[in-house]
Image: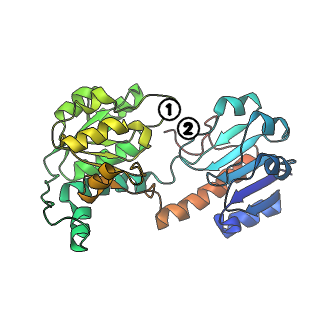
């Protein structure tokens, strides 16, 4: 019988009832409801006899050389998340611990959110709402652009990027794909997406959507040279991590008017910074605080995928690996 410890804010409600009961019947399951991650000493106590750790990002214990050395039974971590750049994979591997993630549970929602960010910018929807509420200056223009018949560079045409491209094509948008992975390039071409190098794509496109994966320690994908390749008046959306875009250069391009608007599914503005406040007030910077995945369907789908991944890990038959990931590769 496998010893499983699950940590999450929702506790037992993190899993569908049928999967929860299956795990309790077939394995030794402990569910701990927490608001935050345990300390290193709590981690050692909580996971002392655990074979499998199941957790969300918010409650992810510190998996350090010190804690892992005290957890000899731990062999699998199931993380209720898509990204895992914050996890030390070489360290886990050195201790014989595998990592399972859920790369597919929010793909459609995130792609739709990327499209919503772009449409909000081109229609000035967010700014119109602010102006109707008296939150934007009277002299701020609501003039936008039509997305139809425009060209959009999609930077990263993996799972999410390819879905973004499909949605854009359905709206009559010409898509240029950018990706260093030859397999992703081939798949994109089969979907009718023209593939080009980054700077060429940015210089030819009217707008850009960043869907790339984050590699720890890597420089921004949209660095200074890439950002200055953008056409004047471009809208840029970043559905990935803020580190994918050079923040300082992007802010300068927004202030100069070279980039017409930047939307990011995170928070990148500095508190109490008058220039950032200006960009927000004038609708040139749109932030959605990492909310792309927060959908009814995603929560339902994610809970079931989380339970199935825990079951597979407990049965010593993980569905895939990152060092194992549950579902298709990114």
Q: Residue furthest bottom?
A: 133
Residue visible at 24% across and 39% down?
253
In the rendering, which numbered label is found on residue 52? Answer: none
Viewer-proximal residue, 231 or 211?
A: 231
Q: Position of residue 120 (x, y in %)?
A: 25, 58
Q: Is residue 263 visible?
A: yes
Indicate whether 30 appears above or below 181. below
Q: Position of residue 4 (x, y in %)?
A: 79, 53
Disc with the residue nearer the chain's start (2 vs 1): 2
Left or right, 265 with respect to 286, comes to right
Other-residue count near label 2 (Cα within 10 Å), few / some / many at <14 / 14–19 / ≥20: few
Viewer-proximal residue, 32 or 233?
A: 233
Q: Position of residue 30 (x, y in %)?
A: 80, 60
Residue visible at 13% across and 54% down?
146
- Residue picked out by circle 2: 85
In the rendering, which numbered label is found on residue 215? Answer: 1
- Badge 2 vs badge 1, beta-carbon distance below 8 Å: yes
Viewer-proximal residue, 214 or 103?
A: 214
Element class at badge 1 = loop
Left or right, 118 with respect to 327, comes to left
Where residue 227 sits, quadrant-wise, is top left
């Amino acid at each position: 019988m496998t010893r499983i410890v699950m940590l999450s804010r929702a506790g037992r409600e993190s899993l569908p009832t049928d999967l929860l009961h299956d795990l309790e019947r077939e394995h030794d399951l402990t569910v701990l409801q927490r608001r935050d991650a345990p300390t290193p000493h709590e981690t050692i106590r909580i996971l002392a006899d655990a074979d499998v750790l199941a957790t969300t990002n918010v409650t992810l214990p510190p998996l350090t050389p010190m804690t892992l050395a005290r957890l000899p039974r731990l062999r699998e971590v199931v993380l209720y998340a898509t990204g895992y750049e914050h996890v030390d994979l070489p360290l886990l591997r050195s201790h014989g611990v595998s990592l399972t993630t859920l790369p597919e549970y929010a793909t459609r929602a995130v792609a739709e959110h990327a499209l919503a960010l772009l449409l909000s910018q081109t229609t000035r929807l967010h700014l119109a709402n602010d102006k109707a509420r008296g939150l934007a200056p009277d002299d701020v223009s609501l003039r936008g652009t039509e997305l139809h018949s425009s060209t959009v560079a999609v930077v990263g045409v993996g799972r999410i990027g390819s879905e973004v491209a499909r949605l854009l094509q359905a709206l009559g948008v010409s898509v240029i794909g950018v990706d260093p992975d030859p397999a992703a390039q081939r798949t994109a071409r089969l979907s009718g997406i023209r593939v080009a190098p980054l700077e060429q794509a940015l210089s030819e496109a009217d707008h850009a959507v960043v869907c790339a994966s984050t590699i720890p320690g890597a420089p921004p994908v949209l660095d200074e040279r890439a950002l200055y390749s953008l056409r004047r008046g471009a809208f840029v959306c970043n559905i990935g991590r803020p580190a994918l875009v050079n923040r300082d250069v992007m802010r300068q391009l927004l202030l100069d008017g070279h980039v017409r608007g930047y939307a990011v599914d995170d928070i990148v503005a500095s508190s109490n910074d008058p220039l950032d406040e200006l960009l927000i007030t004038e609708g040139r910077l749109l932030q959605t605080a990492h909310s792309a995945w927060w959908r009814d369907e995603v929560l339902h789908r994610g809970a079931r995928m989380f339970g199935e991944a825990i079951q597979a890990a407990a049965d010593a038959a993980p569905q895939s690996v990152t060092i194992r990931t549950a579902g298709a590769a990114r």
